[in-house]
Image (tube, rainbow, N blue to C red):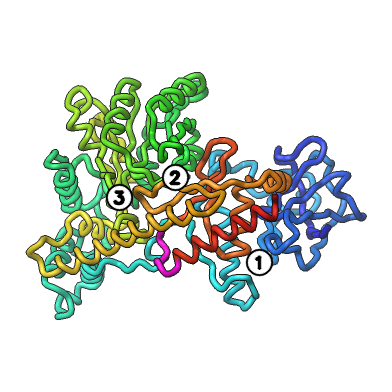
Amino acid sequence: MHSLWLPGAELCPDGWGGAQRPRLLLQPFLSLSVGPAGRREEGALHFEPLYTGSLFPAPAHRVWTQPPFPPPESCCVLTFLPGLSRVMALRAGDHSQVAMNGLKEKVLTLDTMNPCVRRVEYAVRGPIVLRALELEQELRQGVKKPFTEVIRANIGDAQAMGQKPITFLRQVLALCVHPDLLNSPDFPEDAKRRAERILQACGGHSLGAYSVSSGIQLIREDVARYIELRDGGIPADPNNIFLSTGASDAIVTVLKLLVAGEGPTRTGVLIPIPQYPLYSAALAELNAVQVDYYLDEERAWALDVAELRRALCQARGHCCARALCIINPGNPTGQVQARECIEAVIRFAFEERLFLMADEVYQDNVYAEGSQFHSFKKVLMEMGPPYATQQELASFHSVSKGYMGECGFRGGYVEVVNMDPAVQQQMQKLMSVRLCPPVPGQALLHMVVSPPAPSDPSFAQFQAERQAVLAELAAKAKLTEQVFNEAPGVRCNPVQGAMYAFPRVQLPPRAVQRAQELGLAPDMFFCMRLLEETGICVVPGSGFGQREGTYHFRMTILPPMEKLRPLLEKLSQFHAKFTREYS
């Protein structure tokens, strides 16, 4: 047992504790018990490390506090991050103690802040990633670890994993940012022409000027031509296209338009489980109802309309379901939907009067033989009336994924189809509040949707680089599936597309029991141990949602091939060791 004493800390009710023995959470690594069982010494509060090995190192010092302690039913939240040597007490009440100490009550506290924000969770950048950052810092400081580097396989950040930028994209962007380079002989003529075209469309001929809120008109027109070419000649109207700060911003904007009502009339949104946590986080922030429908793991994460119907019927008792979100290709599950499935989903949405949201940011990332990307817009239009003329749809794309991997520039768009014109005006108004998407991101989007033509000097190099990136991703997808499926107790569906594997792992009952004792999800416990012992950072499946009693983790396939194979083998070996330890 290790003691931490807090100087002048005030422990206040926040509704999290149990009546008999309330608990204080030292997130993410320690648990503190308050009440009779916690008073081991006069004036002391005892902190129990959740794990006594290297995973959760014991505090190396004591911090002192003043008695008296709160009554047993009180509790608060404390944060302890190993390696930073700090404890933060987050106050939640007890106005009398504040007055006694002569301190002014803060206007913004956990009690007074927006409760919807408190409910927001985003697993991709959660506690495991915070610990990974600390481990990186400790390694730089010379602290000995059983590994030499932290491999952050938790997020689809291609260039952070070593992927090289596409030359043409960066050449044009460099010319736009620093137009004096237009006189340099080091840049091809087609890149110069492209940069001049973009700059002519910018205010003051500068990338540093605001654009209109929906994005530069020239680039919206380029996006419309791209969609038309992608969809086999089906027209796209630039007035229905809004540029955005990545796809995420556009998704949240559309959700804001959809959310209304209170109680049983509150908006419900159907999202896939497993899901990308943006959706659950946005719905929590907007105080909407998350309606889960489960993808079928036994059929390579297929989407089943019967499951959609089950989820919708179950939701109608407590909310008003108004939207259906589809992620294709899937994140975190990597499946690519067949055209027949898309048609069935569109018919279902039409019959049930649901607004369709198609997250298609991985449309360039399709690897499996026999798999092909079909846009919801194309399928919808080819189905003809009444679907093509009435079914409301918003589809999203981004420069962050694909072969580009330009996450940091935050470029994306949404195309809306069959949206009420009055609502579309409201959408324009909502976007205007944020002024405009980043203009460098808009410029980058222009190059993605309008790449070099075969007659351009940059075409050959652009095509070679693009194909090399996608071919390597396909090889990584196949290798990941193969290595995981050779490991006992691990099962991985084919990575048909996107950038992730979502393998299922068997965890021994004793490991599950130990995790429950520590107040952790079992797969979170597994992933934390994996990070501390191997330096591999992945995200537990519980952060994406999964069927009860199953355990997964999401891992990106982006690390370079020379690192990916050893990473996969090390991960498989750790699972075997972990299984032996708790068997």
Q: Where does label 1 land, which residue?
A: 84
Q: Amino acid at mark 2?
A: Tyr
Residue 316 horizontal/vertical position (percent) = 47, 20
Badge number at residue 359? none
- Closer to the chain start, of discs 2 and 1, is 1
Residue at disc 2, secondary structure = loop
Q: Which residues are magenta?
A: 556-563
Residue at disc 1, secondary structure = loop
Viewer-nearest of labels 3 and 2? 3
Q: Where does label 3 land, which residue?
A: 366
- Image marks 2 and 1: residues in contact by CB distance under 8 Å: no
Residue at disc 3, secondary structure = loop
Q: Is residue 405 left or right of residue 488?
A: left
Q: Amino acid at mark 1?
A: Leu
Residue beneath the point at 87% across and 53% down: 67
- 559 magenta-colored: yes
- Closer to the chain start, of discs 1 and 3, is 1
Foreground pick, 469 / 263: 469
Q: How much space separates mark 2 and mark 1, taking CA atoms? A: 30 Å
Foreground pick, 183 / 165: 165
Q: Where does label 2 land, which residue?
A: 276
Residue beneath the point at 76% across and 49% down: 98
